[in-house]
Amino acid sequence: MSSETKQILTTDGIPLEISLKKAERKNKIKAFLLVAPLLLFLIITYIFPIGEMFTRSIDDKMITNMLPKTFKSMETWDGKELPSEEVFASFLSDFKILVEKKEHGKLAQRLNKEKNGFTSVVKKLFRQVKRNKIDDTQNIKEQIMKVHKRWRDVEYWQAIKRTAPPYTSAKYLKAMDMYLNEDNKIVQVSEDRRIHRILWLRTLEVAFFVTIFCFLMGYPIAHLLATLPMKYSNLLMICVLLPFWTSLLVRTASWMILLQQQGVVNDFFVIIGLVADDNRPEMMYNKVGTYVAMTQILLPFMVLPLYSVMKTISPSLMRAGKSLGGTPFVAFWKVYFPLTIPGIGAGCLLVFILAIGYYITPALVGGASGTLISNQIAYHMKSTLDWSFASAMGLMLLGGVLVIYWLYNKLVGVDNIKLG
Amino acid sequence: MALPKYTETRYRIWHYFYIAICTFVFFFLIAPLFVIFPLSFNAEEFLVFSEGMKNLDPDAFSLRWYKDMVYGTKNPWGLAAKNSFIIAIFATLGSVILGTVAALGLSSRHMPFKGIIMATLISPMIVPLIISGVAIFFFMAKAGLAATHTGIVLAHIILGTPFVVITVTATLSGFDHSVTRAAASLGSNPVNTFMKVTLPLILPGVISGGLFAFVTSFDEVVVVLFLAGLENTTIPVQMWTGLREQLSPTILAVATCLIVLSTLILISAELLRRRSERLRGINR
């Protein structure tokens, strides 16, 4: 048809195409308006704050705003020898304002994080300023250098200069047990202080093994549930669903009772003669406790997606496989197993993502060797109040989860997530 | 699962092995819950089975921890239970309303940017709780809502809506849209159509989403630990402190009550699921 073909008109005389587009747009707006309240609510209360975690984690503006003149005059300083009189003068004038505002303590704290030993030198300078011992008309450099020998050390001025940028990657490096040294190079902290890397690896290890255990235990029972006649499987399903609906803390409490030294599990081991009564093994407050409790708690999240996939596989496929000459094992491996892969993917993803962010159970049954990265985040949020560090670690964890999620989406597709 | 008579021995052995594994896993899943029942009736203060309990001596059992839970002086459980129920009920209402309306929009085939919007809406379910906790805490602290009931309710609405969105969109996926068109052609306005036609049909999905939201809120501890002050303590927070400090049998009494509650929720969720499947015409 050529473009000159007469346009189809609606009864109002408007071309049908335009009229349809208009209706379509109206429907789009209608649908969007329905979603809008929740979307807005989540963006304001949830998505923005996650973004705020990012700015908080790299924010280093406090000191930039404290020493504006110093940093301005430092711009021309090459950083090799002691800075000029001008830098000293502007530092003194910045410092005097801080003393007036009683913020010199914060400055000392921040500088001390950059280089050890700043607390005492700042305090000394503060006393001199407070007593008006420093004449700010002439020879400021000499006077400050007299206050403490560290003011004559160029390394301390280099440290001040390093704090100039309003943003810092220090928190992220710290989470990886690294820091920026004097020459602006990334180096590792000394061996005995590498605690975070151990926690990351342990978190990954626990999440990985809990996923494996859940898979090994979840696959057979999902298969049984999917192949049994309804009246039996419904009954057995309760064994999966009751823990699923029961409070996490109740289940953790029950494991604490079971695994304690005088607990039921140890009693049982003693009765069957596996261990001596006076030599009961410690099963709680270590990794064993974390593994056992987390596997039981997360198992339903593996069974339910597996079950919903297995339920859709027709039993005649296995029969066909066998009738074509496969042994039951071959039929299972070549026919049944490949069909369950979407379920395996969904179950493993769910369990892994839940396990990697676990916090409550490891904190209660894990003891010192069972703590994970989430415990560390909570610790910095509530005890040390280093919120920017907690934010940095949280975002690194989130990044990991998103990568896994993206991989899963590529490999299996997200549409397979089902509940119950 | 009776085996046919012609089964070879090695498959017979394998089959029994498989049944044994399954039995063990089911036992592993359900048995820990049943340890709590008898111990919560312990007459003594320790969390182990006493000799009397092993011999089923009636004197070894008592209701003292239940009495302590209800009447105990300086006991936080009353306040915690009240807070938990108030917060969970309001959080459920909020999640259900926001989530259902959003699901209606999402199920429309005209919805633009469906993928990314869906991902945003269910993100609180995917993001590890500890990160959600930190982010929500930053917002609530700024908004002046930390240590208030309102703040915790809003936080739980955030965490609960994904469940409602997912269950309701799933219900709507089998929904016959011609019934709403029929209602419209008979002169009904959209609100009326929703209340009289759509809602009754998707109700099972809405309620089961609401149950998920309720349980999420009722059981949630990570975010509440960040947000709650002394006045806003909830049952999970109280259990958390109890388990960390003094492991008293009163906690087991509370835990027993919670297991009873979750059994009730499980039964209603199951009944709803079956009803929903019947309504959607899914026959097995």
Image (cartoon, coloured by chain):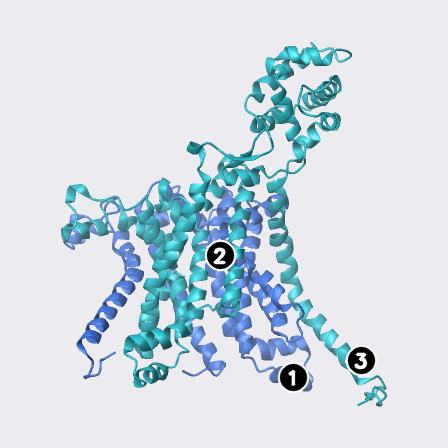
Left or right relative to A125: residue A376: left
Q: Which mark is residue B181?
A: 1
Query: From this viewpoint, is residue A234 visible?
Result: no
Please report whichever mark, 1 or 2, sits nearer to the chain's N-terminal start.
1
| Rendered colour, chain A | cyan
Q: Quadrant of residue A277?
A: top left
- Residue A354 location, x and y as percent? 45, 56
Q: Which residue is mark 3?
A: A18
Q: Label 3 is placed on what type of residue? A: Ile
CA gap, disc 3 to disc 1? 23 Å
The vertical placement of B181 against A381, above or below, is: below
For the N terminus of chain B, the quadrant is bottom left
Q: What residue is drawn where x is 67% and y is 31%?
A: A164
For the C terminus of chain B, the quadrant is bottom left
Left or right relative to B170: residue B57: left
Report whether mark 1 lies on the same chain as mark 2: yes
The subunit carrying tag 3 is A
Q: Which mark is residue B62?
A: none
Q: Label 1 is placed on what type of residue? A: Arg
Element marked by disc 2:
helix
- Residue A42 location, x and y as percent? 61, 57
